[in-house]
């Protein structure tokens, strides 16, 4: 049964498609299935070749025909009705809804590299006695301060202060660093020489800055563990090596521990201040770290430094403890999540929410399931909004500007609030369209009633639970504030309508 | 009394085509203009519901002529009854579906 020489190539392609499709067919029927398709193709191809009609177009048609073998093979493998039913009904279930949201959450966490900003909030602070450390920041937006002036001021405040042991300034900028693989955009912070001493941090390789380095080693830098491992491939000879930061040669004197995070995780290079050099920086990128004396409260230290900073010309100085800032985002999330949950439950069960179900007394089990599902769904959605708002804004800022822009904080807060409101609204809307018993999304929408009989009769949409638990009447137009969605539980007499069909009559 | 079995328009068209003498998949596809991905699964369902019966042609004949055997479909008694009901439901079916194969050739 040698194929005609003119069609050998085409026959080979068709056979390859058919063989592949036949893998879908159960083994018992595979041989007969393949034979039927092969027979059809063989005859058709020979007819075309012998009648001189085998053109490029007819060959394409033939190939298209071969691809039709896949749906046919799939028909053999899968129960058509059951598959269609599964595809139509599975997305309506509560399990699918929660599963889809969970997958979205996991994907988001993976995409953001396991949410480093949020993770850092849960880790113990890598500093000595972190409870005594506080930030002094200047909430002045884009007002610019002279860096040198700030460093000299903080040295003076440390001498005058009665509530703190030490005060050190910092100021950060985006920088471009030359690494073995090229150039990278990163963030660098200028700090006073005793900065790491105040924090109580040590280097894992080499050393950190010490007093006197500003004159003895003004071009020395300390790099983070992240930069050392990713950009310098954990090269143990990094100490003493010269790197280029903003085209300036700098000598690496140490590598910080992996858990060291200050301000935000992206600060990768630590430098000493330009003494006597009038470099300006915007207020939001500058600040100071205070180590309070033992048993001194944040309020006392804050009161003292408010006065000192204002005397120095700094507007709106603010004090915040290290521990408080580290957990700030989480507190904000928890506060808003609890508010949303209680607000959502209150709204969902009130007439304002339009979901009051008349004549329906759910048992404790169903009530628990109903609100438990709502809580789980809302919690996950808000978690997605939180992770997305916090991590993605930071990542985008680094991608587009090379640093954490001062606007990232307010943008991520607003983004979280807006997305959380959208998520909460959707969650409430979704909840109101679910069966009160099985939690499946209601379907089979039907418009009922007459618009012109609005005050005499009923006009709206009816949604039905596919398992026959009940109907939801949604008024098209509320004629009074007393009108709301109505749930009607279907009794046993309706059961035959929702039973699965037994015999297959119509293909 | 058994309720009349209702079939879709596509199935009715395929039954009408087979009834007109176009008895294998490719022929039916050419006449109806439906794609192979529709024709073959429809034939399987019709066969499963006993409206058509598929038979292999005699293998010896095929081998003698050095070609693979083909599978021919024909309407069962039940299939003919269903088709008659369908023609009543779809009066244009008789006009849409082809005339007898023998008459065309």
Image (tube, coloured by chain):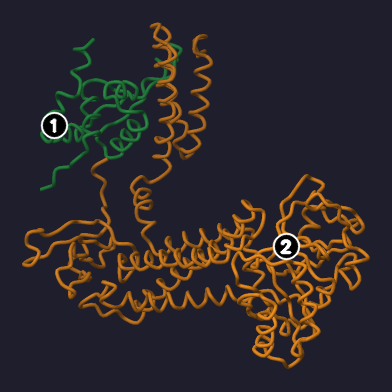
Chain colours: A orange, B green
Q: Residue at x 80, y 68 (%)?
A: A257
Q: Position of residue A488 (x, y in %)?
A: 20, 70
- Mark 1 falls within which chain? B
Q: Residue at x 18, y 62 (%)?
A: A476
Q: Position of residue A168 (x, y in %)?
A: 78, 76
- Disc 2, SS: strand
Query: Residue A475 occupies which quadrant of the picture?
Result: bottom left
Q: Nearer the viewer, residue A138 or A463?
A: A138
Eyeballing the image, is A211 above or below A94? below
Q: Position of residue A319 (x, y in %)?
A: 65, 80
Callout 2 environment at 10 Å: few (<14), some (14 to 19), or many (20+)? many
Task: Say whether mark 2 and mark 1 are on the same chain.
Answer: no
Q: Nearer the viewer, residue A398 or A384?
A: A398
- Mark 2 falls within which chain? A
Eyeballing the image, is A445 above or below B55? below
> Residue A267: which disc?
2
A244 vs A97, left or right, is: right
The residue identified by callout 1 is B87
Query: Residue A60 occupies which quadrant of the picture?
Result: top left
Q: Position of residue B75 (x, y in %)?
A: 23, 29
- Disc 1, SS: helix
Eyeballing the image, is A168 above or below A404? below
């Amino acid at each position: 049964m040698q194929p005609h020489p003119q069609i050998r190539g085409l026959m080979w392609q068709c056979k390859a498609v058919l063989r592949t499709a036949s893998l879908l067919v159960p083994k018992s029927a595979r041989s007969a299935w393949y034979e039927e398709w092969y027979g059809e193709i063989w005859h058709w191809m020979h007819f075309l070749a012998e009648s001189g009609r085998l053109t490029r177009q007819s060959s394409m048609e033939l190939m298209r025909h071969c691809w039709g073998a896949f749906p046919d093979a799939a028909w053999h493998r899968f129960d058509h009705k059951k598959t269609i039913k599964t595809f139509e009904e599975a997305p309506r279930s509560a399990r699918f809804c929660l599963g889809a949201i969970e997958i979205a959450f996991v994907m988001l966490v993976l995409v953001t590299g396991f949410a480093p900003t949020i993770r850092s909030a849960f880790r113990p602070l890598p500093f000595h006695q972190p409870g005594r450390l506080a930030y002094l920041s200047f909430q002045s937006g884009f007002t610019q301060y002279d860096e040198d002036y700030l460093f000299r001021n903080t040295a003076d405040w440390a001498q005058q202060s009665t509530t703190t042991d030490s005060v050190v300034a910092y100021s950060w900028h985006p920088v471009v660093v030359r690494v073995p693989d090229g150039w990278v955009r990163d963030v660098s912070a200028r700090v006073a020489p005793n900065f790491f001493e105040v924090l109580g941090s040590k280097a894992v390789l080499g050393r950190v800055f010490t007093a006197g380095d500003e004159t003895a080693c003004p071009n020395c830098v300390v790099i983070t563990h992240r930069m050392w491992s990713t950009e310098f491939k954990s090269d143990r000879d990094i100490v003493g090596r010269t790197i280029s930061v903003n085209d300036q040669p700098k000598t690496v004197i140490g590598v910080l521990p992996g858990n060291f995070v200050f301000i935000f995780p992206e600060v990768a290079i630590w430098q000493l201040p330009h003494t006597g050099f009038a470099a300006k920086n915007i207020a939001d990128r500058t600040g100071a770290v205070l180590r309070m004396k033992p048993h001194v409260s944040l309020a006392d230290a804050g009161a003292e430094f408010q006065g000192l900073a204002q005397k120095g010309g700094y507007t709106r100085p603010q004090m915040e403890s290290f521990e408080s800032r580290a957990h700030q985002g989480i507190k904000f999330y928890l506060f808003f999540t609890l508010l949303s949950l209680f607000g959502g439950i209150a709204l969902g069960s009130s007439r304002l929410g339009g979901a009051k179900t008349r004549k329906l007394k759910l048992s404790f089990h169903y009530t628990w399931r109903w609100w438990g599902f709502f809580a789980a769904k809302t919690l996950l959605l808000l978690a997605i909004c939180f992770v997305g708002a916090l991590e993605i804004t930071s990542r985008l800022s680094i991608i587009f500007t090379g640093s954490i822009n001062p606007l990232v904080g307010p943008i991520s807060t607003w983004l979280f609030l807006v997305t959380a409101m959208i998520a909460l609204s959707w969650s409430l809307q979704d909840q109101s369209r679910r069966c009160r018993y099985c939690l499946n999304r209601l379907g089979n929408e039907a418009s009922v009633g007459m618009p012109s009989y609005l005050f005499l009769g009923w006009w709206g949409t009816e949604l039905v639970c596919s398992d026959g638990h009940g109907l939801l009447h949604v008024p098209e137009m509320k004629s009074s504030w007393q009108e709301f969605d109505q749930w009607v539980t279907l009794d046993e007499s309706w059961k035959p309508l929702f039973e699965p069909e037994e015999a297959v009559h119509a293909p | 009394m058994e309720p009349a079995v209702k079939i879709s328009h596509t199935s009715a068209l395929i039954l009408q085509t087979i009834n007109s003498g176009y008895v294998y998949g490719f022929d039916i596809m050419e006449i109806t203009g439906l794609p192979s991905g529709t024709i073959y699964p429809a034939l399987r369902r019709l066969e499963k519901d006993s409206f058509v019966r598929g038979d292999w042609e005699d293998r010896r004949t095929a081998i003698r002529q050095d070609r693979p055997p083909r599978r021919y479909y024909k309407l069962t008694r039940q299939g003919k009854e269903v088709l008659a009901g369908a023609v009543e439901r779809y009066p244009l079916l008789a006009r849409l579906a082809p005339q007898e194969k023998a008459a065309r050739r």
